[in-house]
Amino acid sequence: MLAKKIEDALNQQIKIEAESSQVYLAMASWAETEGLNGTAAFLYMHSDEERMHMMKLVKFVNERGGKAEIPMLAQPPKSWSGIQEVFESLLEHETKVTAEINNVVDICLSEKDYTTHNFMQWYVSEQIEEEALARTILDKLSLIGNDKGGLYLFDRDLEGMHSLEEEA
Ligand code: FEO
């Protein structure tokens, strides 16, 4: 049985993952309308991954005798000044998510809930990967600068990254 404090923290995390999925879906849709099809494919996939993160939590809370809450979500932004801003906000968002996950881990330790602590380790590792990926993408973008040819190739590369992750 989940302690109330743990259940609340996990429900808060369900909301954060759902918001992530919604924000990346908005970014993907924006990128698609800007003709950035590779970027859009990458972000659609990323949005799906966040939904999977949310679903994993929903199932865990219910299986452990708690009640998962499906949250109401805020309207995400509709547009960005460019691809750079998209990935800057993505990294900023992921950094906040990491802090929230660390907070859940702290609560697990203070409540001596080692089962949930163990479950949360998957999210801890996932965050390391996601932040590293966002930083790699931003490094590439800063190398490209305003070079249109470079941007074209970058967009094509991101589409490749998307299919690589799907195969993994
Ligand atoms: Fe599920 Fe990107 O955190």
Image (spheres, rainbow, N blue to C red):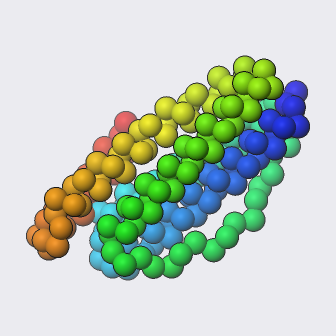
Q: Quadrant of the N terminus?
A: top right
Residue 165, percent from left and from top: 36, 43
Residue 112, percent from left and from top: 78, 21
Q: Quadrant location of residue 143?
A: bottom left
Residue displayed at 30% across by 77% down? 35
Residue 162, percent from left and from top: 34, 51
Q: Total marks drawn?
A: 0
Q: Nearer the viewer, residue 140 or 63?
A: 140
Q: Quadrant of the C terminus?
A: top left
Q: Is residue 8 left or right of residue 119?
A: right
Q: Is residue 73 above or below residue 66?
A: below
Q: Quadrant location of residue 31?
A: bottom left
Residue displayed at 62% across by 60% down? 19
Q: Is residue 106 above or below residue 156?
A: above
| Residue 156 in view (yes/no) | no
Residue 136, percent from left and from top: 28, 48
| Residue 112 in view (yes/no) | yes
Residue displayed at 43% across by 44% down? 130
Q: Nearer the viewer, residue 151 or 131?
A: 131
Q: Nearer the viewer, residue 2 or 109?
A: 109
Q: Is residue 143 left or right of residue 159?
A: left
Residue displayed at 31% across by 44% down? 164
Q: Is residue 125 left or right of residue 19?
A: left
